[in-house]
Amino acid sequence: MSDKTLPGATSRREFLAGLTAAGGMIASGQAEALTPTPVLDPTRVQGAATSAVGARSPHEALTRLQPPAYKGSISLTPLEGLHGTVTPADLHFERHHGGVPQIDPAQHELLIHGMVDKPLKFSLSELKRFPSVTRTCFIECSGNLYTRATEKSTPQMLCGLTSQSEWTGVALSTLLREVGVKPGASWFLAEGSDAAVLARSIPLAKAWDDALVVYAQNGEAIRPEQGYPMRLLLPGWEGNTNVKWLRRLELSDAPFMTREETSKYTDPLKDDTARLFSVVMDARSVITSPTFPQVLEKGWQEIRGLAWSGRGRIEKVEVSVDGGKKWQTANLQGPVLAKAHTRFTLPWKWDGQPAEISSRATDETGYVQPTMRQLIDVRGPGSQPYHLNSIMSWIVQGDGQVLYSAEPWI
Amino acid sequence: MFRYSFIIFMAIANLALAETAPSEPFGLGRPVSPGEIATWDIDVRPDGRGLPAGMGSVQQGAQTYAQKCAFCHGENGVEGPFDVLVGRLPNDAFPFAREPGTVKTIGNYWPYATTVFDYINRAMPFNAPGSLTADEVYALVAYLLHQNDIVPADTVLSAGNLAGITMPASHRFVPDDRRGGSEVR
């Protein structure tokens, strides 16, 4: 917004001054130069003119959480501040292994080679000429559970490494028909154009099933943090395999055994082995309200949350308000999409007594979200930090304060 | 008669369409020469495919490590602050799931020696990724494998012998057996 607004409208400068007076965010000398504007009756003044690019209301302040310990390589989505199922692109979680590269889309090309008849390089504009496909699905980092939580942890801190977008691009199967796949090819390497040159081996069956090379997110070009100008999208698979800044696909008769898929994204088991290529995200749910730091008042609440499964649709979400003794079936907001965040809700009248609220997802394969104890019993206490999709619970104290039930992992 | 002929004609036309439409290439994309592919094709596979020409010794690797790696991974590869690279467990045990906090290293966890080459070559050092020569990468792999007691001190690595090295944890990895359904795995 410029200062040339319609008569009577609050300019950005004046608005900021009002915020400044309240928050004391700017040095006093600067603040004195700007006079706070009293709140006007919006029906008595003309509003602001149009703008080239919209912005959030200055009253809204959702941000990604960037834990300092991860030195700028992880940011988490504010799940508890969002509604419905789509994540605004600028609040999509990030996990980078070599930072966000600066890429000129006019220079960027995607190479497909290896066990193909005709190796080809595709520019972004050529990719956009192929038949387009749009799909809404989640991307979740397989490290998505903060196991050193406290009772003052928020959903964002605990479980904010999942986000959902409407993605648009071209089916990878379309590109593979263009290059021609040689008999015997069974895997492909996907490689990014970042400083990590991040690479993962993917079974070729996923390419024929539902893999996409996408260039758009929520209707506009993919954000740099999500892989601009193009990324691999493997619906339902762990975030790391959805290679961002995609520059190369190499078809092969065997996996390449990159560092990410051997030394990192593998899951030790208690029989002294480790799972390799454990790529599908199992079903889970997370309550987004009520959660810390909310303080409840007696009466009607809506328990809200998200549920999703990398194996298909969410069949059912159950909610307990008594620490898991009794479970009620929550409402699912349609449409319920496969491999997608699904919003669940349940009306609840809080009577002022202490309560413990939990949610449990079931997907269309019949898989029921496990407890942390079940996961530890099956895999062992050291089977960390990937694919920890256990049931999460929140304590409502008698005074209305909501706290995370910080069950220690082990 | 005409009607039947027309129906048969349309059926044949539809068959032809069904056969040609999906297999017709869109004609997009630019053909690339083997030389152009080679500049991007940096991956190294467990069987050694992709290893470049060059060689490096444990001694050379020790020097390069001290200059370019030690400030992140520690003087001996065990001090950090970033990933610990060196360490074996007694009897090459693999107790990671049973004993929380067991630190994963190249010596006790990485299943393939080729992965060490591939990763250093593509992404290290963190402050200058992709800057190492093939000789430097071979030497660093030799040094790190020697520090992990996997190869002797006089080892010189090259495309001829790197893929033949068996890592202590090579037999520990199993396919994912999770399948959905009622069983938690």
Image (cartoon, rainbow, N blue to C red):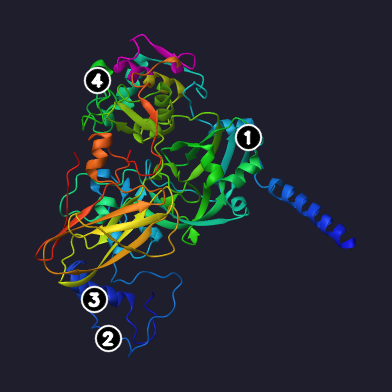
Task: Give the residue type that dot 2 points to.
Answer: Leu
* Residue named by callout 3: A18
Classify residue A60 as left or right of residue A351: right
Q: Please name which of the two marks, 1 or 2, marks the residue nearer to the observer.
A: 1
Quarter of the rendering containing residue B88: top left
Quarter of the picture containing the C terminus of chain A is: top left
Q: What residue is shown at x 34% (from left), y 10% (from top)?
A: B152
Q: Badge 2 is on which residue?
A: A40
Q: Is residue A239 left or right of residue A22?
A: right
Chain for disc number 1? A
In this rendering, position of residue B178 left or right of residue B50: left
Magenta segment, which residues?
Answer: B142-163
Q: Is residue A260 above or below residue A215?
A: above
Q: CA distance from mark 4 to mark 2?
A: 71 Å
As drawn, the residue found furthest toward the right would be B1
**Tag in front: 4 or 2:** 4
Q: Position of residue B85 (x, y in %)?
A: 29, 26
